[in-house]
Image (spheres, coloured by chain):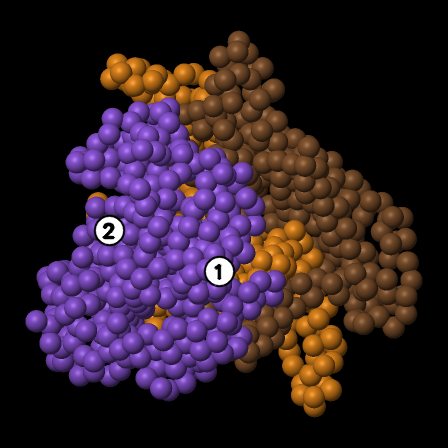
Amino acid sequence: MSVSLKDPVRQAGQARRTGGAAAASGRRPLRLSPVLLLLPALALMAGVFAYPLAEAMWRSVAYPAPGPQNYQWFAADAGNWAVLGRTLWVALLSAAICLVLAYPYAYFMVISGPKLRAALMVIVLIPFWTSLMIRSFAWIILLQDNGLVNGLLAVLGLGPFELIRNTTGVLVGMVQVLLPFMVLPLYASMNNVDLRLMQASSSLGARPFVSFTRIFMPLAMPGVVSGSLLVFIQALGFYITPALLGSPAEMMISQYIYMQVNGQLQWGRGSVLGVILLVATLALLGLLALLMKKSKRAAGDEGGLL
Amino acid sequence: MKHSVLTRSLLWVYAGLVAFVLIAPTAVVIPLSFTDKASLNFPPAGWSLRWYENFFQDPAWMSAFGNSVLVAVVVAALATAVGTAASVGLQKWTRRRAAKSLQALLLAPIVVPAIILAIGVYAIFLQAQMLGTFAGFVLAHTVLAVPFVVVSVTAALAGFDQRLATAAASLGANRWTTFLKVTLPGILPGVVSGALFAFVTSFDEVVLSIFIKSPYLETLPVKMYASVTRDTDPTIAAAATMIMLLTTVIIAVGLLSMRRRKNV
Amino acid sequence: MSSQLAGAGTRIDIQNVTKRYAKSVAVDDVSLTVEPGEFITLLGPSGSGKTTTLNLVAGFTDLTSGSIEIDGQRVDNVPAHKRGLGVVFQHYALFPHMTVAENIAFPLQQRRTPKAEQKTLIEDALRTVGLSGYGDRYPRQLSGGQQQRVAFARAMVFSPRALLMDEPLGALDKNLREKLQLEIKRIHQEVGRTFVFVTHDQEEALILSDRIAIFNNGRIEQVGTSAELYERPASLFVARFMGESTVFRAPVEAAGPDWSMDFHGTRLRGPAAGQVPGRGALVLRPEQLRVAPRAGDAPGGAVKVPVKVVQNIYLGSGHKYELRLPDGSTGIVRTPLAESNGLRPGDDAVVYWSDRDGVLLEDSDLVSTT
């Protein structure tokens, strides 16, 4: 941990050295000022981001005593696996539902005129400036046993259903919160598809359905992949929405971490769960970056020649 | 591309429903804050301002609100300064690969699940006795806010014609003058939106705040979170409405000021 | 050679077609019959309605009124994918996620052509455009010219009733464009199908077409062979659009079987072919004009106009003169090398021609150049 604290200093030293090398090889030397400008940010990142993360990971092997016992605890307890499985499952479902909701929406944006498109875009962006807390709270009101949704269902002669304090409630809340993260990459990707290709396709004898499935959908695929991964990754680490709309009996991993650390003071166990969540998140992010690089290369005209 | 009227209408209806799901739920909070009953039933049977009254008369709500505003203002200032400096530094860095990985590091707090950072920060603040301190809140929120400043200032810098700065330098301005008189006015929209993002990030932050609060110092979202999980009191709806109003006003002011700049 | 692709031509009948948008008329009452096996070019400046007309035939755009028939069948309510026309676009429009072979196979798959037959057809098509062995490449691995050849192959492989091309060479550089022009001409001769070609480049139109339809402001000004358009333009617009010309503009009066006009003090005349317009524009091609230092050097019966020499350009095969006419407008004369006369910029001279040459047209320009 002391290592991570020294990070900026080391970075600066490194920069100075490479600057010298650059000067020697005839390139413009690196001046000191960029390093100075970056120093406050790097110090902050080191002290309040890297250090705490390292501490959290360290505790997984050091608390309450050094050794792998926390990992053994995780592996041995079926309840832990159930939490992990539920988390993955809810994240997967969130991504799938978001995709089903966002795909036609983004497509509609692409084929709309500029004014309607701008309006649809604003609607997607509005949730970004309403706090997550408030939105989860709103769902409590709507989904509670005598809430508006159950009221409407009763009119239809259905229910009342248990819509809250279970996975259904969590899913509803998460989907609504994460939907913009699906719409935006989808729209970006679909907007890149040359719609004139659809004309070409129809001139070659393809029915609209065939043009859509064989030309449009494959070309919009990068958006589907990155949107789904983005939603999935965020869903994995969600805390507020599951905590407010879910139930302690059907916990997700973030709630479990909170419970271990804050409720039971089991730092080691909480940290193990944190490490697992972090590794899963970073692995998926790596995959996302790789896929985006690949699709960028595939899309670039000259990229393929390299 | 041509679409049949049927396809278009179906898409209209579908997009309308999705749009409804995106924005409508939040809207129920506003009428609920004017209910006259001490329950979260929607729609309310009668109307009153008692929950706003309650909010403004309850010292716990008021101090949480004050703390939130104060923390968010300081965070916005600090994150904007630190983030802008870092963005300029990144742009000046001649080794692009190194600059790219440094930028990734600066953006990392957005992608790491908040709960993990929260337990780490909790552990460290516990040791340093910074739980429930103003400085603690500011530091923790600033880390989360800096990435947003970096993103928007970097975008503004990319759109800024660097030759203007070179021209100013050739006219005898020193680096600091060049930055203040040429670069900064050029990237101001990016800086302003970065500051707004920073403010809103801090003002809305819950997960870290739940861990680092103390009975003596908590922010509005923390108080709301506690209120939702414990009591069923519509005061929280009043608080939520005011938060929405505040963030909307801030963002609108930001957008307007940027538009006015553009018109000049 | 490529027997698989050859076939009989198709007649396309465009009758009184109009395409109106909210605020403008893109195509205004256009009628045109394309004969079977013909290579016809729709030529005109940008925004003249030629591309819209092509899109109406292809089915990408719905017409406002009129009708389009292909081989006697009305198609204006038939969706594009059922019209069976091949289209080549300026932007190639190759599917980037498919290989060259997959691109060319696409129209065959839509028609459920048996796999084995597809293979031969694809190879045949690739050979026709000179790209044998490129089937496994992706479009992005090809140059612009190669991509456009693939687009040709794809548009022809399913034996379309006609091939429509919308400025297919517009995105290519000059050398490549000239090379592909010759190839398109060769392919047209080989397959004997109806080709409809859109361009704004009159030289390209001259090289490729059997007939050319000149578009202006959403209407067709004239349809004809290159020679007809060059020698007997129906309007001043056509005369100016097709090649260089010198225009003498003045009020016209009829004089027995002839017409005559007073052009800044010089009397011009010629045989009247029909109705004589009130405001006339006499159009002469550069080859029909001669230039001499003095009026006396011109033959007796010739029509003569005094001019000032602006440029005398030596072209190897002859000279090209740029002249200033008495009304301030510019005249262009080309003479064979044998007629060199030593005129230099600034010299006074006389331009002359036989009174049987030239075409008298209605002066449609609203603003006079004087």
For the residue pair C291 and A107, the one nearer the viewer reads as C291
For the residue pair A190 and A225, the one nearer the viewer reads as A190
Marks 2 and 1 share the same chain: yes
Label placed on residue C177: 2
Vertical position of residue B10 compared to residue C307: above or below:
below
Q: Quadrant of residue B215?
A: top right
Q: Chain of mark 2?
A: C
Vertical position of residue A30 compared to residue C288: above or below:
above
Q: Are marks 2 and 1 in contact (CB under 8 Å)?
A: no
For the residue pair C349 and A30, the one nearer the viewer reads as C349
Which numbered mark, 2 or 1, is in the foreground of this view?
A: 1
Query: What is the distance, in whole Å, between disc 2 and disc 1 at their CAs?
Result: 42 Å
Residue type at mark 1: give it.
Answer: Val
For label 2, the SS is helix
Residue at image point 59% right, 72% down = B12
| Furthest residue in direction bottom, as rendered | A157
For label 1, the SS is loop
Residue C299, image x and y in percent?
28, 41
Q: Colour of chain B?
A: brown
